[in-house]
Image: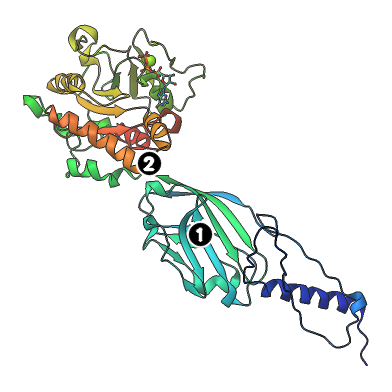
Amino acid sequence: MMRWQPRWLIRLVTLWTLSGVAGAQSPVTAQYGENVILNCTFPFIPGVKFQRLIVTWKKERDNGPGEIQVEETISAQQGEDVIMNCSFGPVSNLQLLNITWKKGSDLLVHSYFSQLDQLETQDEAYRGRTQLYPERFHEGNASLRLKNVRLEDKGFYTCHVKPELGRFSMRMRVTVEKDCLLEPKERLLCPDGDSANLSQDGGEELGAASGTGDLSDSVSGSHESLPSTGLNIALLGETGCGKSSFINAIRGLQDEDDNAARTGVIETTKKRKSYQHPKHPNVTIWDMPGIILGKFSLDRDIELSKSDVFLIFSSDNFTTLHANLAQEIQRMGKKVYFVRSKVDVDLYNNRRKRNFNESRILEQIKNTCIECLEREGLRTPRLFLLSHNEYDQHDFHCLAEELGCA
Ligand SMILES: Nc1nc2c(ncn2[C@@H]2O[C@H](COP(=O)(O)OP(=O)(O)OP(=O)(O)O)[C@@H](O)[C@H]2O)c(=O)[nH]1
Ligand SMILES: [Mg+2]
C-alpha cells in the first residue's frame, strides 16, 4: 500500500479545509442562546491516518481574511466613462463568483451572482450606466465601467468579490471634474456661447470680444494706466461674502500665505488692493472693501473705468440690489458675473435631512439666484457656485476658465 508522505498529508488536509470552506455557502440562522451545528464535510481519502487530521474552525473578522484594502483615486471628467479597477486572484469556478459594487456603505451600484448581472435592486442613479467584463472574470478581474460620469458620482466605491474561496474587497475614491460646456442651465441661457450680452438696456456691445466667451479678448484698450492687453477684474459684494478668499484661491494661495489677501470673519478689506495672477500676469484682480448694497455708488466709490469685468459676490440669494448694481455696470459696457459663495454652508445645513441630495440642493440654489436676477430684468445672467473649502469642486474651475485664469 502507498505510504502518505507528511508533505502530502498537509496538502490533503489543506484541500479538505478548502473544500469545506468552499462548500459552506448556505447561511446558518440561529436564535439567541440556542446551540447550533455548523456542518463541514470532506471527502474520505483511503489511507489517511486520522491521528494526523487537523481541524481548525475560524470566525472571519468583519472585513474577512485575505481582504485587500487598496485605496486609489480615480479622476474623471463629467460626461466621460471611467473604469474602476478591481482585481483578485484567478478563478477556476465561475459559478460561485459573486461581485458587488457599492458606493459608500449601502448604495448598490452593480451586483453579479449566479453567472448573471443582478440589477433589480441597483440604485436608480446607476441604471444603464454600469458594465462588468465577464470575459475577464477568470483572470480575477471584476472591474466596473461607469458610463457618462455625473458630478454626484464622486465618492468612495468598494468592490466586494466572493470567488470560490475567501473574499476580497477593494476601495477607491472617484473624483469628478466639472465640464464647463456641459452645464445645462448656462447652455440654455447662452445657446450661441454669448455668455453675457452687454447690449442690454441700451448699453454698448463689447465689440470683437462679445460672443466669444473669452474674457481675455474683452479688453477694449480701455484705460491709459493699464497695459492694453491687461484684464482688470473687480470683486464686489457685502463684507464677509468671500471676495478675498476667492482671490487667494484663484492665485493658488492659502489664506495664511505671505502675499495672500487678508481674510477674516470681521470686516477685513478696508482699501481696494490689486493682485496679479501669477500664471497670467496680464490679469489683475481687484479686491474691494465690502459694500453696503443700496448705499453704494459705482461713480463715487470705485473708478469704474479701471475694471473690465466685475464679479458680484453673495453668500446668500441675490436680490434686487445686486441686480441694480449689475445693470449699472452693464450700462457702462462692462461684463458682469455673479458668484454665489459658501455653498458648502447650504450643503452642510441640509445634509442631516432625510433624502438629502447634493445635486438637487445646488440646482435649487442656482435656479433661485438666476430666477431672481431674471425677474429683475437681467438677461442671461452668468452665475457660478463656489465653496471656499472645496475650490476643486462646483463652478470654481469653470469660472477660472471663463476669466482666462485656468
Ligand atoms: N464656509 C465658507 N466660508 C467661507 C467661504 N468663503 C469665505 N469664507 C469665510 O468667510 C469669511 C470672510 O471671507 P473673506 O474672503 O474675508 O470675505 P470678504 O468678502 O473679503 O470680506 P471683506 O474683506 O470684509 O469685504 C472668512 O472667515 C472666510 O474663511 C466659503 O465658500 N465657505
Ligand atoms: Mg476682503
* Circle 1 Cα neighbour tier, 10 Å, few/some/many (<14 / 14–19 / ≥20): many
- Given residues 20 and 241, the one toward you in this image is 20
| Residue sitting farthest toward the left | 202
Residue density around tag 2, few if under 14, some if 14–19, many if 20 or more, within 10 Å:
some
Q: List x then y, in percent, for residue 262.
A: 44, 14
Q: Quadrant of the N terminus?
A: bottom right
Which of the 4 image quarters holds residue 52? Answer: bottom right
Give coordinates of residue 74: x percent, y percent: 50, 50
Q: Earlier in the sequence, mark 2 or mark 1?
A: 1
Q: Quadrant of residue 311 in the image?
A: top left
Residue 75: where, in percent of width, then height?
A: 47, 48
Q: Secondary structure at mark 1?
A: strand
Side of 308 relative to 146 (left or right):
left
User: Is any atom of residue 328 visible in this view?
Assistant: yes
Amino acid type at circle 1 is Trp
Q: Which residue is mark 2?
A: 358
Q: Residue at x 16, y 33 (%)?
A: 208
Whether residue 336 sits left or right of residue 289 in the image: it is: left
- Three-letter amino acid code at disc 2? Glu
Q: Quadrant holding ligand 2?
A: top left
What residue is rendered at 55% in x and 58% in y? 159
Residue topped by disc 1: 101
Residue 230 in sight: no
Residue occupying image coordinates x 19% and y 10%: 297
Residue at the image position 41 percent from the left and 22 percent from the top: 245
Comparing 300 with 210, the one in front is: 300
Q: Pick out the residue farthest to the bottom.
A: 1
- Measured as percent of width and height from the top left, residue 244 is found at 39, 19
